[in-house]
Image: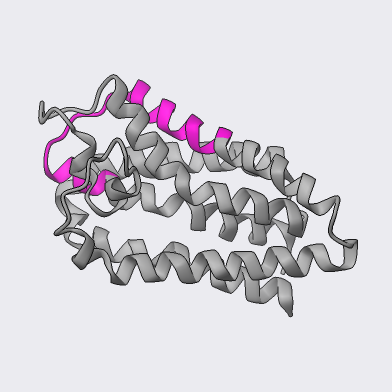
Amino acid sequence: MGIGMFIFLFVTAVSIDSFGIGCVLGLKKVGLTLRGVFLIASVSGCMFLLSSYFGHLLAAVVAAEDAERVGALALIGIGIYFLWQFFKKEKDSEEKKEPWLNPAKVLNDPLAADVDHSGGIRGKEVWLLGAALSLDTIGAGISGALIGIPILFTAVMITVATFCMLGCGILSGSKLSDKAESLSILPGVLLIIIGLIKLS
């Protein structure tokens, strides 16, 4: 598989959730400014860069021939975790946890980002949604550094992809919202596929 297609799959895996969340916000008419979308996308890209730095530190203590295998296994593990989160979503939706203390709750219930129920995501709430969407990129950044993905380019692509997917999701929310939730299964599946490709 070419490096371009590999990076495309990797970027899609860590940013596709943004589209589904955008669809839900669009359906419920929860406002989010273009500046807010850009800020959220930037948070995802920066978190990928930061976590990849720790991946490079880990690579320094792992034998070169083992680093890619460790990264691939980590991606598979992250993918399995995402799938587990997807299938336990219904149970979690019944729990009333404070979103500020549990940003992952926002991935299961995007409306939780509108903490003050004002009908719009603004101020600190933008950072909350950004933190939730960047959770995917933390483990991916560490694993990406281990398997040799070009970090800076991938971080830029993650920022662009998150911006486009979140924005398009909001715009098309009323039409695609009924299918949006099923997209949440894709990140886990794609990360497992990427990990298996690197192991083979």
Residue 9 seen in render: yes
Q: Residue at x 41, y 37 (%)?
A: 131
Instruction: Return the x and y of residue 38 as percentages of the image width and height.
Output: 42, 27
Check if residue 37 falls in the magenta segment.
yes
* Front residue (pair 128, 166): 128
Residue, x 62% and y 68% (percent of image)? Answer: 194
Q: Quadrant of the C terminus?
A: bottom right
In this view, 122 is above or below 93: above
Q: Which residues are magenta?
A: 22-46
On the rendered structure, is 3 left or right of 192?
Answer: right
Identify which residue, 81 or 164, lies in the foreground. Answer: 81
Q: Quadrant of the N terminus?
A: bottom right
Q: Main secondary structure of the magenta part?
A: helix
Locate residue 90, reporting x and y percent.
19, 66
| Image x and y of residue 133, in percent | 40, 44
Residue visible at 28% across and 49% down?
A: 105
Q: Is residue 43 above or below residue 161?
A: above
